[in-house]
Image (cartoon, rainbow, N blue to C red):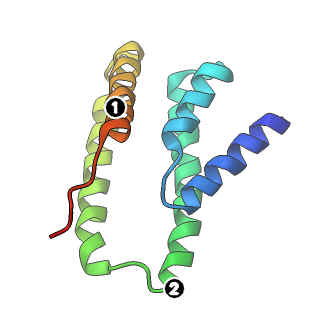
Amino acid sequence: MVVSLLIGTLLGVLAGLGIGGGSLLMLWLTLFENTSPATARGINLMFFIAAAGAVSVLRCRKGGIEWKQILPAIISGCFAAGVCSLIGRHIDGEILRTVLGVLFLITGARELFYRPRNAK
């Protein structure tokens, strides 16, 4: 329980910094807590809603949200998440686990080798 609280706190800090942490939460739950992928996804979604809501309110109060830029992303993201959630119910868990693993590898490789372009 103590380790889970520490992991949750660390992931909350990452969420507050705008980094996220959902991918790490999924890894923690499935690899170390032996949680089924379906249950881990549900927990991850609830964590994300709570963390994103708290951070969004604080950033909004400080004027850190550009609504004209973010509103199209919110609408399209909600639509895509809903459609993929419906599709995901009909896909085998091993396929989803493999796809998630590949996405983690791609994301990790990009983070390791990404070099920002020089601003002109």
- Amino acid at pointer 2: Lys
Q: Which of 69 and 112 is in front in this view?
A: 112
Vertical arrangement, residue 118 with respect to residue 25, above or below:
below
Point out the tag, 2 or 1, that comes first from the N-terminus: 2
CA distance for labels 2 and 1: 34 Å
Q: Position of residue 5 (x, y in %)?
A: 78, 43
Q: Position of residue 4 (x, y in %)?
A: 75, 37
Which residue is label 2 attached to? Answer: 62
Percent position (x, y) of residue 55? 55, 68
In the displayed structure, would residue 22 be above or below residue 35? below
Q: How far across and how far down the image is residue 86, in percent?
A: 31, 36
Quadrant in which the C terminus is drawn: bottom left
Query: Which residue occupies 50% across, 34% down?
Result: 41
On the image, numbered disc 1 is attached to which residue?
109
* Residue at the farthest right position: 2
The crowding category of the residue bearing disc 2, from other C-alpha atoms within 10 Å (few below 14, some 14 to 19, many at least 20), is: few
**Identity, as a three-letter code, of the amino acid under mark 1:** Ala
Decide if residue 6 is on the left or right side of residue 100: right
Tag on residue 33? none
Residue 28 falls in which quadrant of the image?
top right
